[in-house]
Image (cartoon, helix red, strand yellow):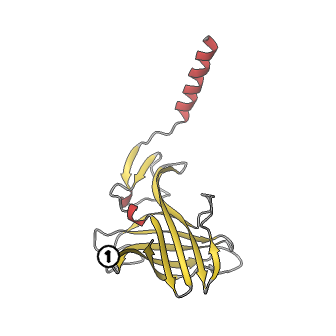
């Protein structure tokens, strides 16, 4: 019995020593700098700006389609702090031929759409002269893992024909020696909520 009690105390002590305690909660709308973050802080989507971006969205143009599925992750620990963010996957079909499909991806370290934690105001780049001061856009990254290329993506909530929609602006940054462009398109696309 004495050994059981000692074992329980040791396990409890070890678990308590390794548990992360949130030091403070910060509204993610105030911005986050990954280089100057506060250890064990929780960068929270206090005002719920990210929630309307969650779901399945579809862009179509003839027999070309671009589907994105976005999920919100809350209080995820980065190893230094906690954060709310959006990540997801996509499928791009051009002229009836599937070019890229990450929808079945289960590897959270190789997301098709990732790190969407930056809330952009109207004065944030890329500028949005039509955005109101209370409106927020969402910025993150998009990857073409087949060619190891990455780009940036910005989402803006809009309404099209009375339906919720997202205007996405995608631009590519090439980070490899092969100088491939992403197979997924760049530019501005309107995705309708499915």
Q: Of residues 170 and 53, which is closer to you in this image?
A: 53
Which part of the image, by quadrant, shows the N terminus?
Answer: top right
Q: Residue at x 35, y 70 (%)?
A: 121
In this rendering, does residue 114 appear at all? Answer: no
Left or right of 130 in this view: 53: right
Find residue 125 and report its image quarter.
bottom left
Q: Residue at x 50, y 39 (%)?
A: 20
> x%, y% of residue 42?
42, 49
Q: Of residues 3 and 60, which is closer to you in this image?
A: 60
* SS state under label 1: loop
Q: Residue at x 68, y 80 (%)?
A: 179
Q: How many marks?
A: 1
Residue positioned most to the left: 133
> x%, y% of residue 164?
37, 73
Residue positioned most to the right: 178
60 above or below 91?
Answer: below
Find residue 91 and report its image quarter.
bottom right
In this rendering, does residue 77 appear at all? Answer: yes
> x%, y% of residue 69?
51, 67
> x%, y% of residue 78?
53, 51
Q: Residue at x 38, y 64 (%)?
A: 52
Which part of the image, by quadrant, shows the C terminus?
Answer: bottom left
Left or right of 176 in this view: 188: left
Mark 1 — residue?
Answer: 131
């Amino acid at each position: 019995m004495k050994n059981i009690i000692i074992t329980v105390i040791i396990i409890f002590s070890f678990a308590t020593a390794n548990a992360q305690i949130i030091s403070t909660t910060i509204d993610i709308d105030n911005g986050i700098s990954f280089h100057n973050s506060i250890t064990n802080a929780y960068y929270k989507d206090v005002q719920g700006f990210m929630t309307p971006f969650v779901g399945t969205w579809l862009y179509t143009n003839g027999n070309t389609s671009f589907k994105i599925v976005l999920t919100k992750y809350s209080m995820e620990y980065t190893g230094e702090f906690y954060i709310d963010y959006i990540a997801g996957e996509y499928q791009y079909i051009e002229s009836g031929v599937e070019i890229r499909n990450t929808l079945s991806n289960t590897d959270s370290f190789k997301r098709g759409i990732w790190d969407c934690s930056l809330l952009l105001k109207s004065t944030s780049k890329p500028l949005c002269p039509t955005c109101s001061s209370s409106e927020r856009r969402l910025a993150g990254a998009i990857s073409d893992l087949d060619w190891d290329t990455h780009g940036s993506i910005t989402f803006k909530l809009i309404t099209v024909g009375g339906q919720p929609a997202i205007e996405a602006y995608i631009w590519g940054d090439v980070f490899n020696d092969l100088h491939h462009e992403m197979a997924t398109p760049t530019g501005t696309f309107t995705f309708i909520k499915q």
